Structure formats: structure tokens, C-alpha cells
Image: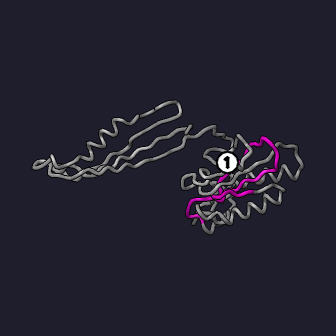
């Protein structure tokens, strides 16, 4: 956690990981986005994955040991999201390889810029991966908890521009942005669309005064799904 790696600045951590993975005898590759993929050349691995970046404030982290926990000194985050996952993967690999424990094929993927929208994962070159299944070491809850699936969240803002006019004197000259928004919303699906997908319009904001045909309106919503 002492290696700073806020989103977009993961290179120092990436270089440390390359050194350690190559030291284990793994083949390390980087895709065009800077994500890391390493494997031992075996077939049908289960890919172990975590992200390298952290949120802010995450520079100059000073970890402290308090009883059975590692914490920051309070001036920064600790960076356990997701460096705890990175550390767990490295420790597992080192333990298995050092003890010569029988094991299946090894493959790991470390991604960039997760904290700002899964950007690294979205740009990961999947052709570098041999595994068809993965365990991602990132998530909330106790260490024993396994999450089998989690919804992707996509938010949206729709800005509608009409034409302002005096509502009493010349409404014919106006184009109501609120009316356009209302007609648009009625065409949207709402609520639970299927077992894995939901859709919601959360807010609508527009107009300025009661006697003016509203020129601008913003519609804000989201959809979530475990299968996109």
C-alpha cells in the first residue's frame, strides 16, 4: 500500500507486480491499456484478478498495525481496495510455487482504473486470457463471503432543449422541453425488466417560472443488470 497508485497512475505498482510475477517464472504481458496478464502457459486456468488503482486521498500512505488489523494513519485511505486482493493473489501464488504444491494452470489479471468506472477491465485485451472463468478479489463483506454475480450500473443524463415563450401571450411560439421529456419517459421501460435487469428514471428537472414555456429539462436515471 506504500506504492501510490491513484486511478490513472498505476505504473509504479505495475512495475512492482511485473518484477514479482516474472520472479515466479510466469509469462507477463501488458495490453495496450496497461493492464497486466500473467500465466504459466497451462491450459484451462481459473483467472485470479484484482485492480491496481485506489481512490483518493491515496498518496503517501502510512500503514499501521492495530491488533489484528492493518489501518492507515488517518490522513489517507489505506488502499486495501483493492491492494488486499492484489496481496492475497501474490501470497497464494508464492505459497503454492515455493512449496511445490500440485496445482492447476495459473493465470492472473491486474487491471487499471477500476475506481473511475471499470475502465481498465472494459479495455482489457481478452485475447491474452486463457481462462474462461475468473475469481475477482474485490468486494464488500467478510473474507469468507463469495459473490457469484453483481449488477453493472449505468447512469444517464438526458438534456432536452426546447424553445422558451411567454405561456400566456404567445405559447404557440414555444416548444416545451418538459412535454418532450414526459413523452420520452412514457416510452421507457420502468422497474424490473427481467430477473437480472432494472431501469429507473430518478429525477426530472426543468423550467424556471410558471408563465414561461420551459426551454430546458434534464432527465436523470439508471439501469442495472447482471447480464449486459
Which image quarter is the N terminus in?
bottom right
Q: Residue 3's quadrant in the figure? A: bottom right
Looking at the rendering, the stretch of residues picked out in magenta corresponds to 29-58
In the image, residue 145 sits, relative to residue 93, either above or below, namely: above
Which image quarter is the C terminus in?
top right
The residue sitting at 28% across, 49% down in the picture is 206
Q: Number of marks in the image?
A: 1
Dominant secondary structure (helix, strand or loop) of the stretch shown in magenta: loop
Q: Residue furthest left?
A: 169
Which percent across, then down, holds residue 215? Answer: 25, 52
Task: Tell me, yes or no, whether the highlighted magenta stretch contains residue 112.
Answer: no
In the image, residue 88 sits, relative to residue 149, either above or below, namely: below
The residue sitting at 63% across, 62% down in the picture is 72
Q: Residue furthest bottom?
A: 60
The residue sitting at 60% across, 59% down in the picture is 54
In the image, is 110 to the left or to the right of 106?
Answer: left
In the image, is 102 to the left or to the right of 144?
Answer: right
Which percent across, then down, holds residue 201? Answer: 38, 41
- Does dot 1 land on a helix, a strand or a loop? helix
**Nearer the observer, 34 or 13:** 34
Task: Tell me, yes or no, whether the highlighted magenta stretch contains residue 33.
Answer: yes
In the image, residue 106 sits, relative to residue 23, either above or below, namely: above
Q: Residues within 10 Å of mark 1 (few under 14, many from 20)?
A: few
Where does label 1 land, which residue? 126
Which percent across, then down, holds residue 25? Answer: 84, 56
The residue sitting at 67% across, 48% down in the picture is 126
Which percent across, then down, holds residue 176? Answer: 23, 46
**Nearer the observer, 83 or 121:** 121
Amino acid at each position: 500500500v506504500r506504492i501510490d497508485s491513484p486511478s490513472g497512475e498505476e505504473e509504479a505498482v505495475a512495475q512492482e507486480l511485473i518484477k514479482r510475477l516474472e520472479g515466479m517464472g510466469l509469462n507477463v504481458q501488458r495490453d495496450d491499456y496497461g493492464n497486466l496478464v500473467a500465466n504459466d502457459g497451462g491450459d484451462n486456468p481459473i483467472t485470479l484478478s484484482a485492480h491496481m488503482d485506489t481512490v483518493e486521498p491515496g498518496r503517501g500512505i502510512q500503514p499501521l498495525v492495530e491488533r489484528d488489523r492493518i489501518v492507515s494513519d488517518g490522513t489517507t485511505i489505506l488502499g486495501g481496495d483493492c491492494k488486499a486482493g492484489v496481496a492475497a493473489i501474490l501470497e497464494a501464488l508464492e505459497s503454492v510455487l515455493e512449496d511445490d504444491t500440485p496445482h492447476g494452470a495459473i493465470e492472473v489479471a491486474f487491471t487499471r482504473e477500476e475506481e473511475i468506472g471499470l475502465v481498465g477491465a472494459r479495455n482489457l485485451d481478452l485475447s491474452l486470457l486463457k481462462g474462461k472463468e475468473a475469481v475477482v478479489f474485490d468486494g464488500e463483506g467478510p473474507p469468507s463471503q463469495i459473490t457469484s454475480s453483481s449488477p453493472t450500473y449505468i447512469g444517464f443524463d438526458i438534456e432536452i432543449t426546447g424553445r422558451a415563450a411567454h405561456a400566456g401571450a404567445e405559447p404557440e411560439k414555444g416548444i416545451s422541453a418538459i412535454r418532450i421529456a414526459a413523452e420520452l419517459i412514457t416510452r421507457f421501460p420502468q422497474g424490473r425488466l427481467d430477473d437480472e435487469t432494472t431501469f429507473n428514471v430518478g429525477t426530472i428537472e426543468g423550467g424556471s417560472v410558471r408563465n414561461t414555456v420551459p426551454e430546458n429539462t434534464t432527465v436523470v436515471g439508471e439501469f442495472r443488470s447482471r447480464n449486459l
